[in-house]
Image: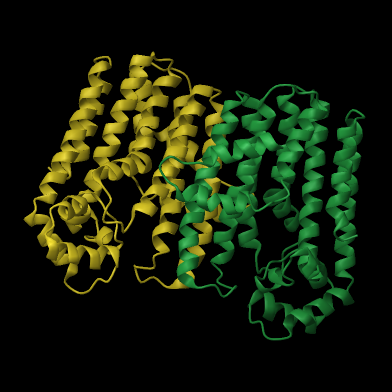
Chain colours: A yellow, B green
Amino acid sequence: MAQVNDLIRTRMASKHAPRIPEVTAHLVEAGGKRLRPMLTLAAAKLCGYDGPYHIHLAATVEFIHTATLLHDDVVDESNQRRGRPTANLLWDNKSSVLVGDYLFSRSFQLMVETGSLTVLDILANASATIAEGEVLQLTAAQDLATSEAVYLQVVRGKTAALFSAACEVGGVIAGADETVTKALYAYGDALGISFQIVDDLLDFAGTEAIGKNIGDDFRERKLTLPLIKAIAKADDEERAFWVRTIEKGKQQEGDLEFALELLHKHGALDDTRDVALEWAEKAKAALEALPDDPVRDMLRDIADYVVARVN
Amino acid sequence: MAQVNDLIRTRMASKHAPRIPEVTAHLVEAGGKRLRPMLTLAAAKLCGYDGPYHIHLAATVEFIHTATLLHDDVVDESNQRRGRPTANLLWDNKSSVLVGDYLFSRSFQLMVETGSLTVLDILANASATIAEGEVLQLTAAQDLATSEAVYLQVVRGKTAALFSAACEVGGVIAGADETVTKALYAYGDALGISFQIVDDLLDFAGTEAIGKNIGDDFRERKLTLPLIKAIAKADDEERAFWVRTIEKGKQQEGDLEFALELLHKHGALDDTRDVALEWAEKAKAALEALPDDPVRDMLRDIADYVVARVN
């Protein structure tokens, strides 16, 4: 992991545009969990890889993740719902868009260096799925008719696609056979879905200790699983509440508290947690097809860790 | 070219997110000149290519160009200097960022399909150079100390990098030898620089018939070559004018007219045109290393066409 961090630091530099490492540094060096690159390293190790390119791939995956975060910021900040001054917002927009693009292209250079067309194919497809998921989320937002199936599709795109690709390329670069790479993909897919559902649940059920701002998704009118489940069970009066707050966005003092009441009343938070746990179990089940190894145990622990935040 | 357009139309589709083709269509089908994909096709033909992948590469190059335009829109619209309503601006921002990302990833898929690691390497490097050039432009903006050398670096990044890559990959996919691919690169590089200088000149010297809005760059305080040349010859009083209008952005009625007067007074427009013509000549000179062929004549004509707008 130290080698991955070194490579990230080297490759985020720019001879000509010093703004790039400035903007990137506070994201990359903010002490994130580095969960995605760790998955790549683990998958490569599990498959007995002894070449140098798992480091490149781990850095690639982290760069794609960071670029996505930068662009997400633009999409979310555009809402201007967090009361930040507009000038600052706009400055951030420009830098975030362009530095995000720079990181995408740097990730692209890193993966080309591995010389594996299969790896390139997997990551190209993952990138397209991520972008498609983000656009789908944009168009599904504020639409009360959003189903659990559409939600799952969004989550598979915006989160799980990079988790599954991170795992799969670790196996592919090691020359693992298809049973193994498919199992790694399935593990990453289920883990990513579980991870995102937990994240969406914590937006309502978290505590400030976790560093989450309760109710951000509600204020941004994002239809995540807890809301979808509560809306499905809404009576006429409750439905009117959701239409006003989510569809029309006319929120007022006390609305978040009432939304939380409805979520509790319909068991939407418990049901959402159950779904997250199911996906964590699926992730662990996918590991069965992999060789028995301490790294496999670690991957199992990661699945437990992801849901531990709500368990 | 019809095959390229077909491929573009097929690949900009999205099963899950219909917003993507909506946003893309008005850009891709707005009847642009398709100059960049034409360069790829011409280079491949000149080098005797008879496979199918020049079509993929031409579509790749147009997708990268379109994605860049979408993100440029965000960066420019963030200025809010065109008086458009904010809600619309924000909606466009989100869609432009995410659909731009989608097109980048689609272009990436297309180039992986060619199976050529050399092509991938060239386009990965071009992407990084483009993004770096855009960030450099952002940090150089409003800085009166911007030199012609920095301007050239920005132009090489944001415009010429894609022109040169478009030409080079056409030769590479055809298996041309290094003398030829280097000449194609040099041609595209010089052509792209000439193209951008002409564009920047037309922002001051154009007529409405060309469809340009005179003075946009001045209003957006972009330090392009005409301004850099005029500022280099400014006396104290003129310098105060540039500090006020460009550095501090305190523009008022009549400023554009006075700026144009200064540009004429110092011959900045004529000097800029001379530089554009020099680069067009360099582009044509690069063609000498290529086989004598009707396609080579066409590439020569393109260089003349690019500067014809200001000649």
Residues B284 and B38: in front is B38
Q: Residue at x 51, y 55 (%)?
A: B96
Across and down, in percent, residue B215 comes to 73, 72
Question: Is residue A87 visible in the rendered structure shown here?
Answer: yes
Residues A109 and A275: in front is A275
On screen, residue B123 versus residue B279, left or right, reads left
Labels in figure, total: 0
Q: Residue at x 68, y 75 (%)?
A: B246
Quarter residue A251 falls in? bottom left
Q: Quadrant of the N terminus of chain B?
A: top right
Residues A46 and A108: in front is A108
Say above or below: B180 vs B104: above
Question: Is residue A33 visible in the rendered structure shown here?
Answer: no
Q: Residue at x 55, y 42 (%)?
A: B104
Across and down, in percent, residue A246 comes to 26, 63
On screen, residue A233 versus residue B234, left or right, reads left
Residues B289 and B148: in front is B289
Across and down, in percent, residue B307 comes to 86, 54
Quarter residue A167 falls in? top left
Most extreme residue toward the left is A265
Across and down, in percent, residue B147 comes to 76, 62
On screen, residue B62 versus residue A183, left or right, reads right
Quarter residue A47 falls in? top left
Most extreme residue toward the bottom is B253
On screen, residue B158 versus residue A80, left or right, reads right
Q: Quadrant of the C terminus of chain B?
A: bottom right
